[in-house]
Image (spheres, grey):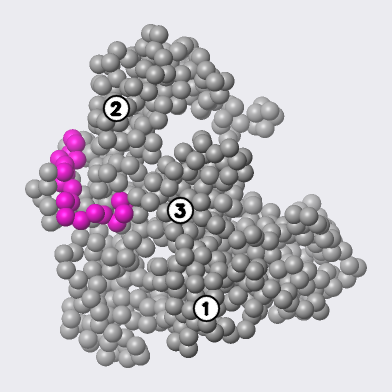
C-alpha cells in the first residue's frame, strides 16, 4: 500500500501552539476532533476533551430529587435563563451525556419520570459540533491559534467574522465518479465496478484494474496519496458512496475502505432520506455521507452549492457556526437556526428541546385584521415605457432588525405600555431587550450589503464572482429567517412576530406610495417590496432623489434598479381584463432583461421550449 501523505499529522495532539484554519469538526469517543490546515499545507488532527450535556428545568426540590435518582457523575446545578424574556436566571440541572443518542434517550426518560409535567428540557438536540463552537467562540474556516495542554485545547481567534476579505487556505479538490457494468437499464449495488475516475484541477486518474477488489484498494490509496480537502461527487449521497461501500463489503475490505482523513471506514447511514415540499414541488434529500476530516459536496443534491458554490458554503459555515459539510447538505433553515442558537448561548439562554411558546389567543375579528400577508397594488395591464423600479433591500429582515421583532419581544409581558407598537394591530414590542432573531440578523444584513457594494466596485472578475456567491448565500439565510418566524417548530419564532412583520411591511409600502405620488409619480405596479413608478420626462436623477427621500422617511435602505425602455404586465389567461401580479417582462435602458413568471423563467418549462 502507498504510505500516507506526509502532510497529514495523525498522532496525538502536538504540544505547544499550532496555527491554522479549521477544516472540519466532529465528536468522537467523548471528545471533539478538530482538523486544522496550516500555512505550510500540513493537516493536523487535534483532540479536545469535551463533554456533551443538556439541562433540566423544574422546581428546585424536583431537580435535587432527579439528581439523586440519576446518579450521573459530573451533574451540577447552574444558573441559566430558561426563556429569552426572563428577567433573572433560574436554577437548572446540568446533565452530562456520552453522545447525542444517549442524550435523547435519557431526556425522554426524564420526561417520563416527571410524567411530562415536572421537567422541561433544554439543549438536548443541539449538534455537539455546533455546541462546542458556540462555547469556544470558534467557527469553520476561522484562522486560529490552538494551545494544547494535558487538559485540552485553548483556542484564540486570529480572524474576524465581520471581515469580507477573509483569507481561505488553498484547498486541494478532486471529483470522484465511477462507471458501472450495468446488467439492466439502471445501475444497482449488485453491478460490478468498471472504472473509477478521480479528476483534479490538472490531472485525471482512471482506475480500471481487471479485478474489482484491486480497483477499490487503488481508490483509497490514491485518495490518501493525493490527500484532497474537498471531494466532489454527482449523486454521491444517494448512490455513489452507498454503492462503493457495498462493493467494498462484497469484496471483504469494508474495514479498510477509508476515504476520510480519520482512520474510520466509510460509514453509510441506513436511515432513509427526507421528502419535503418546496414551492409546490415534492423534493427528496438523501441522507448525507460524511467524510471525516474532508469536505464532501454532492453537486446533485446540494442546493446551496448549486446556487452559491464553495465560497457560499464557507460563508454560511462561518457566519452560522455550522460545519461546512453539514451546511452543504442540510436545509438553509438549519444553518440559519444555528446562528440563533449561538446568540442564545451567548446570553446564557437555554435552547428548548420542544417548543412550548404558543400563539396568543385571538378573536375572529382580530384574526381578520392580523392574518394577512404582504400588500400589493394590481398592475396596469399592457406595454409601458420609461418606468423606473425601486426595490426595498431585504425588507422583511430589515423590519425584523430595526423594529426588534422576535418570538419573545412581540407582545412581551415586561413592556405592556411600550411606545413601540405594531401598526393595525397595536401589539406592544419589547423596549428592554433586543430579541434573539434581530441579534442573529444584524451581521448577516451588514455583510450582504458590503458584498453587494464590493461586487459593483471591484475590477477583479474572480473576486466579483466570490462576492456574488457569498451575498446570494446570505440572501437565502435572510429569506428563511422571515419564514421561520411563523414556523411552528422554530425555537425562537412565534406567529405573532411573523404577523407583526407583515403589518409593518404593508404600512411601509403604503407610506412609500403616498410619498411618491405627492412628488408627481404615478404608480404602475407595487408588490410587497417593489414599486414600478412613472413620471413624464423623469430622469435617473429624479428617481435617485425620490429614493433618498424615501430612505430618510422610512429609515430603511432602498435600491433604484433602473429605468425600463419598455415593460409588459400580463393579464390572466382566464380573465383577460384581470391583471396578474407576478408575470411580466421588460428591458432596462442598459439592455438588461428582467422576466418573471413566464416560460423563459419558469422551472417547469420544457428544456426544448426554454432553448
Residue 552, relative to residue 190: is it above or below?
above
Are dots 2 and 1 in contact, CB under 8 Å? Answer: no
Point 34% across, 22% down: residue: 545
Q: Which residues are magenta?
A: 420-439
Number of labels in the image equals: 3
Q: Which residue matches tag 1?
A: 17
Whole-Å distance between the Cαs marked 3 and 2? 30 Å
Residue count near mark 2 (Cα–Cα under 10 Å), binned few <14, some 14–19, many ≥20: many
How far across and how far down the image is residue 431, in percent? Answer: 16, 51
In reply to whether residue 127 is colored magenta, the answer given is no
Secondary element under disc 2, as helix, strand or loop, is: helix
Mark 2 — residue? 550
Cα distance in 3D space between marks 3 and 1: 24 Å
| Residue under the point 47% across and 11% down | 385
Q: Is residue 547 above or below residue 250?
A: above
Residue 163's label in the rendered image is 3
- Where residue 228 sits in the image (x, y, percent)? 69, 65
Is 463 positioned to the left or the right of 514 in the image?
Answer: right
Q: Residue at x 24, y 68 (%)?
A: 82
In the displayed structure, does residue 473 sit left or right of residue 390?
right
What is the crowding at mark 1: few (fewer than 14 residues within 10 Å), some, or many (at least 20)?
A: few
Q: Main secondary structure of the magenta part?
A: loop
Q: Residue sitting at 49 percent across and 22 percent down?
A: 584
Between 80 and 115, the residue placed more toward the observer is: 80
The residues tagged by marks 2 and 1 sit, at their Cα atoms, a distance apart of 53 Å
Mark sitting on residue 472:
none
The tag earlier along the polypeptide, 2 or 1, is 1
Q: Position of residue 532 (x, y in %)?
A: 39, 21
Location of the N terminus by quadrant is bottom right
Amino acid at each position: 500500500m502507498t504510505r500516507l501523505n506526509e502532510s497529514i499529522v495523525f498522532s496525538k495532539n502536538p504540544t505547544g501552539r499550532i496555527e491554522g484554519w479549521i477544516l472540519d469538526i466532529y465528536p468522537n469517543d467523548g471528545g471533539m476532533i478538530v482538523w486544522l490546515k496550516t500555512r505550510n499545507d500540513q493537516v493536523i488532527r487535534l483532540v479536545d476533551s469535551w463533554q456533551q450535556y443538556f439541562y433540566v428545568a423544574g422546581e428546585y426540590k424536583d431537580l435535587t430529587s432527579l439528581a439523586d435518582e440519576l446518579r450521573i457523575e459530573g451533574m451540577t446545578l447552574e444558573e441559566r435563563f430558561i426563556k429569552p424574556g426572563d428577567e433573572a436566571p433560574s436554577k437548572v440541572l446540568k446533565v452530562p451525556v456520552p453522545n447525542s443518542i444517549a442524550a435523547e434517550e435519557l431526556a425522554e426518560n426524564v420526561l417520563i419520570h416527571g410524567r411530562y409535567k415536572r421537567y422541561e428540557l433544554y439543549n438536548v438536540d443541539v449538534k455537539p459540533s455546533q455546541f462546542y463552537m458556540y462555547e469556544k467562540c470558534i467557527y469553520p474556516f476561522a484562522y486560529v491559534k490552538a494551545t494544547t495542554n494535558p487538559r485540552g485545547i485553548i483556542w484564540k481567534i486570529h480572524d474576524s467574522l465581520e471581515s469580507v476579505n477573509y483569507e481561505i487556505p488553498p484547498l486541494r479538490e478532486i471529483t470522484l465518479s465511477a462507471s458501472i457494468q450495468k446488467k439492466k437499464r439502471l445501475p444497482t449495488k449488485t453491478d460490478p465496478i468498471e472504472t473509477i475516475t478521480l479528476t483534479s484541477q490538472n490531472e485525471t486518474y482512471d482506475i480500471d484494474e481487471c479485478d474489482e477488489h484491486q480497483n477499490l484498494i487503488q481508490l483509497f490509496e490514491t485518495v490518501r496519496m493525493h490527500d484532497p480537502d474537498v471531494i466532489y461527487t454527482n449523486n454521491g449521497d444517494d448512490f455513489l458512496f452507498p454503492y462503493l461501500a457495498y462493493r467494498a463489503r462484497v469484496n471483504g475490505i469494508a474495514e479498510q475502505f477509508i476515504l476520510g482523513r480519520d482512520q474510520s471506514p466509510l460509514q453509510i447511514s441506513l436511515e432513509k432520506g427526507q421528502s419535503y415540499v418546496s414551492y409546490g414541488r415534492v423534493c427528496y434529500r438523501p441522507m448525507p455521507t460524511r467524510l471525516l476530516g474532508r469536505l464532501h459536496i454532492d453537486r446533485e443534491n446540494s442546493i446551496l452549492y448549486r446556487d452559491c458554490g464553495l465560497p457560499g458554503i464557507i460563508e454560511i459555515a462561518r457566519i452560522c457556526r455550522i460545519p461546512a459539510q453539514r451546511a452543504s447538505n442540510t436545509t438553509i433553515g438549519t444553518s440559519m437556526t444555528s446562528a440563533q442558537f449561538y446568540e442564545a448561548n451567548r446570553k446564557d439562554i437555554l435552547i428548548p428541546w420542544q417548543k412550548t411558546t404558543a400563539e396568543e389567543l385571538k378573536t375572529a375579528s382580530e384574526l381578520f385584521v392580523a392574518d394577512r400577508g404582504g400588500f400589493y397594488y394590481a398592475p396596469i395591464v399592457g406595454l409601458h415605457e420609461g418606468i423606473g423600479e425601486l426595490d426595498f433591500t431585504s425588507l422583511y429582515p430589515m423590519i425584523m432588525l430595526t423594529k426588534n421583532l422576535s418570538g419573545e419581544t412581540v407582545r412581551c409581558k415586561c413592556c405592556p405600555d411600550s411606545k413601540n407598537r405594531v401598526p393595525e394591530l397595536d401589539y406592544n414590542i419589547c423596549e428592554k431587550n433586543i430579541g434573539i432573531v434581530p441579534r442573529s440578523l444584524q451581521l448577516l444584513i451588514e455583510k450582504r450589503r458590503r458584498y453587494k457594494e464590493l461586487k459593483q466596485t471591484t475590477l477583479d472578475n474572480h473576486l466579483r464572482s466570490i462576492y456574488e456567491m457569498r451575498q446570494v448565500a446570505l440572501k437565502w439565510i435572510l429569506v428563511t429567517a422571515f419564514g421561520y418566524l411563523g414556523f411552528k417548530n422554530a425555537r425562537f419564532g412565534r406567529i405573532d412576530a411573523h404577523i407583526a412583520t407583515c403589518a409593518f411591511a404593508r404600512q411601509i409600502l403604503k407610506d412609500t406610495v403616498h410619498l411618491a405620488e405627492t412628488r408627481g409619480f404615478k404608480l404602475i405596479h407595487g408588490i410587497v417590496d417593489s414599486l414600478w413608478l412613472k413620471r413624464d420626462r423623469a430622469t435617473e436623477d429624479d428617481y435617485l432623489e425620490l429614493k433618498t427621500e424615501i430612505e430618510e422617511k422610512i429609515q430603511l435602505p432602498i435600491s433604484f434598479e433602473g429605468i425600463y425602455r419598455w415593460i409588459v404586465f400580463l393579464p390572466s389567461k382566464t380573465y383577460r381584463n384581470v391583471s396578474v401580479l407576478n408575470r411580466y417582462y421588460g428591458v432596462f435602458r442598459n439592455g438588461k432583461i428582467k422576466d418573471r413568471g413566464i416560460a423563459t423563467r419558469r422551472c417547469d418549462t420544457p428544456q426544448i421550449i426554454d432553448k
